[in-house]
Image (tube, rainbow, N blue to C red):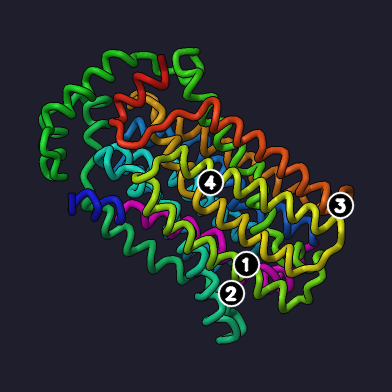
Amino acid sequence: MNKIIYWSITVAVAGFLFGFDTAVISGADKPIQAMWDTSSLFHGLFIMSSALWGTLIGALGGNYPCDKYGRKPTLVLVGVLFLVSAIGSAIAQDPYTFALLRFIGGVGVGISSIVVPAYISEIAPAKYRGRLVALYQFQIVFGILIAFISNFLISGTSGNDWRLMLAVEAIPAVIYLLMVARAPESPRWLVQNKNAIKKARSILIQLGESKPDTVLLAIEKDKKQNVESKLFSGTYSKAALLAFLFAAFNQLSGINFIIYYAPRLFELAGLDVNQALLSGAGIGLVNLCFTMLGLLLIDKYGRRSLMYVGSIGYIISLAVVAWAFSNQTGGVLVVAFVFVFIAAHAIGQGTVIWVFIAEIFPNKIRSKGQSLGSGTHWLFAAAITLFMPYFLEKFSPAEIFGFFTLMMVGQLIFVARFMPETKGRSLENISINTNN
């Protein structure tokens, strides 16, 4: 068990790089635009959004190396992409090169959202699988927080402090590469793609599996039962629909809108600039604390229980924020219930999403299913991020939060009527029940 925890933590460091890479660009935002004298449209769509488009591409295509070459080589590839992006964007001499290097880092983010949950789910015992896969989300949140702290400490140290902010990411990227280079391959991938039964058995024993032959029999049975390799063939339609809806609801909660536009949102609620920025920092702290709580609870109470708590928390907090804006009751109430919203997200969708999507697909198409869920997540994230400034001009904050509230009522119905519980069950057992 100790080795499984070690390799799960090691692989989840890719999540730290994900979070760090996503947030670190905030420190380079204004200095880059001033230095290269780019228009707001060019800066937003080309410089700041390049990583986001890379993430979408990585999520949609990351299943190919994951299946073709294995989980471990893909994990190494993720580290290389982050390292190249960190060093390259830090020394870039023009906006086009910078955008390309940020795009490469985004591809690393997208691929990591497929391979990390898939790998950890395939080596973890059912009893602890939830919290071990959820380490990925914890590391994402932790990486975001460390990026903000790093930017704060480096800010003002030199005329080109933004370059150092970006270059710092190379340090955890190198550490991650050195650690993951020694990781074993996924035994389920070895059986499914290489028919390497002996090697898979050896790895299961190394990982501390007490009944390796029983696990191998279940893997081989799953392989024989799930021979269809096309995700949209109809065989896996139920699992595909679950992944799509789960990922779509994640973004239709408004989580990216609130995180990306928190200072603007708090200013609309009547706070001054400094209060808005301080409240934004509070979001990061609440997110981290309740993600940790979700890690502790997911294997004890199950995925659906956390989603019930999160969904109800979403509905209450979003409804109150909508009411506060419609009645102009002031910023304190808005800030308080935005924090409740973040807590509900962290303990529900934030903790569960990568775990659940990694569990519901058979070994044969797990990475393709991850690609569907992750791609849906990032497509909705990109759309909301790009169009929300426009919606803020056309609709009132009360109307926008009312829409998000309605979507979360839909999520609550989804959890109650359609979402299966996967706690404590083997991946092969989940596959049988989900796809039949």
Query: In terms of image quadrants, where is residue 191?
Result: top left
Nearest the eye: 396 or 26 = 396
Q: Amino acid at mark 2?
A: Trp
Q: Amino acid at mark 3?
A: Ser
Disc 4 and disc 3: Cα gap in Å? 28 Å
Predominant secondary structure, magenta span: helix
Give coordinates of residue 360: x percent, y percent.
41, 29
User: Residues in magenta?
Assistant: 10-39
Residue located beneath label 2 in the image? 162
* Residue 80 in sight: no
Residue located beneath label 4 in the image? 309
Image check: 235 left or right of 89?
A: left
Disc 2 and disc 1: Cα gap in Å? 9 Å
Pointer 1: residues within 10 angstroms few (<14), some, or many (20+)?
Answer: some
Residue located beneath label 3 in the image? 396
Of helix, strand and loop, which one carries label 4?
helix
Residue located beneath label 1 in the image? 26
Relative to residue 181, is residue 170 depicted above or below? below
Pointer 2: residues within 10 angstroms few (<14), some, or many (20+)?
Answer: many
Relative to residue 37, is residue 106 depicted above or below? above
Q: Amino acid at mark 4?
A: Val
- For marks 2 and 3, the one nearer the N-term is 2
